[in-house]
Image: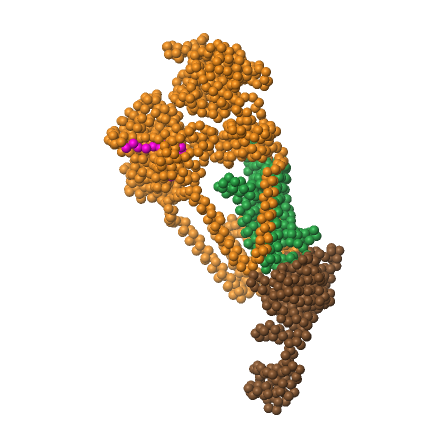
Chain colours: A green, B brown, C orange
Amino acid sequence: MRNFLAIYSKEMRSYFVSPVAYVIAGVFLFLSGYLFRNILMQFNYWCLQFSQRQQFAQAGMPNLNLNEMVVTQFFSVMDFIWLMVVPMLTMRLFAEEKKSGTIELLMTSPISTTQILLGKFFAALSLYTVIVALTIVFCLILEVYGDPDWGPIWSAYLGYLLLGGTFIGVGVLASSVTENQIVAVLLAFGTLLLLWLIDWSASFAGPTAAKILSYLSIIQHLQDFQRGVIDTGDVVFYLSFIFFTLFLTTRVLESRRWRR
Amino acid sequence: MIEVRELSKQYGDVTAVDSLSFRAETGQIMGFLGPNGAGKTTTMRMLTCYLPPTSGTASIDGFDIGEDSLEVRRRIGYLPEQPPLYLDMTVEAYLGFVARIKGVPSARLRSSLDDTMQKTGVTHVARTVIGHLSKGYKQRVGLAQALVHSPSVLILDEPTVGLDPKQIIDIRETIKSLRGEHTIILSTHILPEVAMTCQKVVIINNGRIVGEGSPESLTAQLKEGEILRAQIAGPKEAVQALLASVPGVLDVQHEDAAAGGIFLVTTAPGQDVRDPLAKAVINNGYGLRELRSMDMSLEDIFLRLTNEERVEA
Amino acid sequence: MMKTYATPISLVGAVLIIAGVLALVLAPGMEWLPVVNAGSGLLLVAFAGILNPDLFRHYGRWLNAFWGGIMVFAILVMVNFLANRYPQRLDVTEGKLHSLAPLTVQTLEALEVDVEAIAFMEGGTNESLRSLLEQFTVHGKGRFSYEFVDPDRDPERTRDYGVRNYNTLVIGAGPDTRQRLTELTEKEITNALLKVARNRREVVYVSVGHGERGFSDNEHDMKPLLERLQEIDYAVRDSLFLAREGEVPQDCSALLIAGPRSGFLPTEVDAVRRYLARGGAVFLLLEPLYTTGLEELLGEWGVEIGDDFVIDTSGIGSLFGLDFTIPVATKYDAKHPITRQHRSGVMTFYELVRSVRLDSTAIATIGADAAVLVTTSEASWGETDLSVLRESGGEQTVSLDDNDLQGPVGLAVAVHDTAGAGGRLVVFGDSDIATGRYFGLQGNGDFVLNALSWLAEDESLISIRPREAGYRPIALTEGQSDWVFWITVILYPGAVAVLGFVVVSRKGRWSVKDLAAAGLGVALSLGVLASLNYLGDRYHLRVDVTEDGVYTLSTETRQVLQQAEAEGKLIHVKTFMSDLEGGRYQDVMKEFGYITPNFEHDIVDPQKEALQVRQYDVRERGTSIIEVSGDGTVATERITAQSEGALTNAIRRALVADERVMAFTGGHGEGELTSVDGDGFSIFNGRLKELNLEIETNVKLGKDPLDHVSLLAILGPKTEFSAQAVDAVRQYLHRGGDLLLMVDPATVSGLEDLLRDDYDIDIGDNFIVDLSGLGKLFGADVSVPVVISYADHPITEGMTRGTMSFFPWARSVAATSRVGGATELLHTDRNAWGESDLGVVRGDGGEVDYDADSDYPGPLSLAVAVTVDADSAAEGESTRIVVFGDTDFASNQYFGQQANGELLASAVRWLAEGEGNLDIPVREPRFNPINLVGNAGSTVLWLSVFVLPFAVALSGFVIMLRRGYATYSSGFVSWLVYNFVAIAIYYFIVAVIGASEGSILRGEGLLLLAMLCAGIAHGLFYRRSLAWPLALATAVANAGLSFVVIPEDTLQFVFTALSIANVCILVWIRQDFQSAAGTEPTSVPA
């Protein structure tokens, strides 16, 4: 356990000391802030319009529910930003170690590969969680100006935690496969994008293939969380996804021993 | 104590290490000599459980590197060719991290940190970012990370490469000061370094041991004859013939230098032909400028053993 | 000493000169301020030259570099100016989009009269219009001329051309034929040209009265065709009721009969025959399944229509997501004027088309020349087994068998009676091609228009309309798309990956044994995960955390579904809408699916699955078909409402479906369910199939037992029922049975007393005369009352305001007491009345006028619905009765007209629904809008977009400083230097602008400040001790100045914040200036 903590704290410190964490957090918050404001203004515009034309029934007007219009919209936009940001977060985890030779230090010290991996994984996850948690400010703004239903917000955040785990799992795997950080980023980004769009081809595939393909899409499972329904099926999907990527990473790290 | 039994390593069809066997006694500094690509690094990586051997085994303080690699790793300090440094951490934080993952109990953490830094002379840069340190200090920090958990076995892979002379001397002093506390394997291809610091030398070439023993015993074993170096002014052939005629001289090599010829005279072992030779040269009216005997330097031994072509000085 | 000052002085001088010159360039009007600046600048430079003569040698290098830059910049500006003043446009697009379309060229060349175009443009000129009109003149060969007029400079001409606003183009060939257009595109100009050059106007008559397609803008009607016809100046008369007119009008240049569904009367067929004989032109579009009565006439003209519908298995349709019932034709008759211009490859679509062939012998006899205009590909055939289309009942398969018509199948023919009076006939096997949904698709529109132009003998118009971007279709059959998938997704990337692996792994030297072990490990873990996931997906718990419980279904729904699961029934719901609509309804159905595995739903896009739409006879988007199948029986229910309640009730009804029987009485002249002609009820019979009721016909009241019947229907009895028949009905009603009664005027059913005494329904002995004139809209006279107001009752709930229903020869049916469950469903208009003198109806004379005493004043009720609690033992069981004062409103002839059919269908559905309808509240997320009033919006902007990211970035910056620079202060000093340089540049720009506007304060003052800031930056860089106090003072001044200098308020915030930050930093690193005055900036230690 001590070894895990050692690796974890070392990674966290190196995250918060180097510009990586701040640049990522800054850019992400700026983007999501901008998007949030626009979504909010759009909704506000609809509300104003609706209140002005209160006197006759406005059938066409979308159902003015704060949660549905703003919260779900905002979260569904955010996950795409993460798709691009997480590979940056995880690319340095192993690739840099290999390039700078420090992998030998880790591999020759009395610490198992799993502990190294878990230490790094949870460090990245904690950074991800801190940045996501910063977006609570937007929900507070909503609380000030309207009264959102906090149930779906918490379930969305849980969904995000699991999604983050999946993204980081894939990122770590990509990082462990190669020394070169660029290759690590591209690998991670490519895999995630494929998993994101996999359900698109479901509409052309046969019935069973369609079911499997749409099941594999990491975004399909997020919709329930964002809508406020926590389904154990989805939780199992994400956890098994994370387990599998970490398991693969340990195999890749172990394989270092067979090769050179 | 390190014991290696028929350790070998194949990469596909290339044999990097071919059934190596040797022993290093506790507290002894063993030199591991060999040209680049001779298999030194591979052997060290196998000893530190970084690479699994294709066959054969080795044991550190009785623990086998295959079965109980965790114990082995707890007992070794390893400084690879490229010091494994996190450039964005400060020296103190880095050594603290290494101590923790090497299993130093948190109670002794602070103390072992301080005296390791003191031993390797990096205390005054403790709070500086490693990235900002010069090559020399980086090497010292690399050494410190190998010592911080005071391991019983220390494996240093070419610790002095790329340093300036002054730094090399410091590092050597530090390594010498460790004699007795740890069993040290020092791999290098700088021969004088081995002669000065190591009590025992193993010479390895193409993955096989070609020579083993203390530096002195090695030279003794291989000394076929004395070599005299004489600088004589005069016609080359005549002088060469004269020298060859002196009794006890086996072979005369000629090297032309600016001021008169340089002649290397090999004589049978144990025979000192300097006086008759000098007399012969003077009687024939040639100018004898210099005459001294050359003992078989390690380099010669090394060259002899690894029968490489002459390395230009 | 003086020498050291020479450089700064010369610098100041240079700045002044530049500021002065720039101010002069910016505002040539200003006189003295820029000149003063430049002058004093020159003086200073000269003075500095005196102080330190070799100053200029030092500057030489700088100067010529400076001048070089200026020269290059000037050249660039010049080149750009020329480039967009004289643009040359090379149109390389294959479709020659930007040059004139062939139609325009053709029209210009066909001009016989001189045409003049006068453009009244604002400011007198418009570049793009000029180049367009230029091209027109080039092709016009002298017939077309244009002129630009500036309305402000030439008001009288503008007035006498009647031009009221700018940018109008007037095209005319003489004073009377003038077209004014404001939309200045090539298409519009060409159209205007067409109108001006032609003098004749074609008139197209459209036949109605047999269920033909109208011109409303729903996608099944022909609105786009109407618009295009009006565009090319055709007059369209869209209500020729041949039955009434008896003759095709003289001025009709083409008669359009689009998709008739009921038969033409013999008189009407003769009218068409006479019209054709005298050289008329008929455009007939048919539909499978319907006989039109014109078959015999067509036979005379050598046209044979197949009683089939064409199946096309070539797979080309799959590109557009269309199935095999929508053939795609690509081969056209190359010689015939209609299809001559159709390039091969342009596709036309025919939804459910029948085959059309030519009988060569008949054609030879009348000496006409005829041609098959378009044929399908070989992989299609005319399917004669029409059962698939008739009954709706799930999916049936279609196969090519011997009595079908082998492909390729002809879909449209054209016959021209050259020997006789020149009559022309075009017959299409499908009418959907002219409807809104398909008209715009690829070649459809052009094909229909060309046919009409040929019929109206107006060949000049026949050509391909100016087309959009070059049309380049690709048609991938199934096989080809799979092949593409394998190449692009699997083989190609796979090959690259393998190559890469081989290259990379050559030096990796994997050992096989370990690889195998790893592979096994991976496979094992995958297996475990897959099963884990399957279980997770199968037995999972769904927790709905939303406050409004939007995703939890009601307990009743759960019970119904569990009951279905218990009975082993499988529920399958097909909803006809695109998967983008009805989001919430689809969520609800997903939740149904989670409760029980027996529930499945799929979304069928009506656009793509035309056959299923036809099979289930779906008329409305959003209809859901619920099929509950189990132990051999399939019960189908149909709902259009999209809510949990409607779905659950439908499932509940389907579960209990098999026990309900609907009996139709016979033997008293009632309407025939099976007869297909005008007054039969076959269409009504088709609709009953949806309500999954067992139908029994010809039930003899009084003789046959009624106890198993749940709904009794009596369709317009002509003769009176016997007393014991009435008794049977009374017992049946008291037992709780439901009744549908339709009675015509001047008939006595014998049930009148029973209904009046027990159920307060008074059937008036009259017939309705309606003077409201509503009927005139579609040629109905006073004997046909029209209803547009409906009561608020489940039956008439779906009737939106304004939909009409009409009842030829109806009588009044009123509810005498409002108490109890009686509601009057339909009311006629106020000035309609119940005429009690039935002479007219019986045909023995008598005239129609309102006499106060005997007639019933309007508005009158024509139908009543009653719900009465039956007195039988079963509690909750109630009797429902619906009485209509007319029968033929629902006969085949009128069933499809307006709302008649819907009214009767929903009445039957209400009667068949029975009791125990669950009402399940609709769960909608509650209405909670937000109101950001006033500057709340901008605070949100500030908070979310600036403050948070800025704070995070700042904390990162501080950490970076700690690591980046040996000490904090050297980091901050460089920050300050950049800051002051930036501020200096900004002030310099504002100063130049100020000087050019002549204000001394902004001009000179800021120039001074700019130079001061530059100096401070220099001083800070070299750690001059003097620089510190000056920097502090300027920073404080900046904080105040920002409100003067910066226009935009948010930027003012930023600038002030920056200045304050600078002040704090300066205070913080004060000691750095005291001690290290004058030393070089310390670099990083060794």
Magenta stretch: give its range: C347-360
Identify the residue shown where x is 42% and y is 29%.
C387
- Residue C152 as seen in the image, left or right of residue A249: left
Identify the residue shown where x is 50% and y is 23%.
C693
Identify the residue shown where x is 44% and y is 23%.
C684
Q: Can residue A37 be seen from the camera position used here? A: no
Quarter where residue C1070 is shown: bottom right
**Picture quarter with the N terminus of chain C:** bottom right
**Picture quarter with the C terminus of chain C:** bottom right
Identify the residue shown where x is 55% and y is 43%.
A217
Q: Residue furthest top?
A: C853
Q: Residue furthest left?
A: C419
Q: Nearest the camera: C178 or C845?
A: C845
Q: Nearest the camera: C52 or C682?
A: C682
* As drawn, A207 above or below B266: above
Q: Position of residue C759 (x, y in %)?
A: 53, 13
- Residue C34 as seen in the image, left or right of residue C126: right
Q: Nearest the camera: C413 or B216?
A: B216
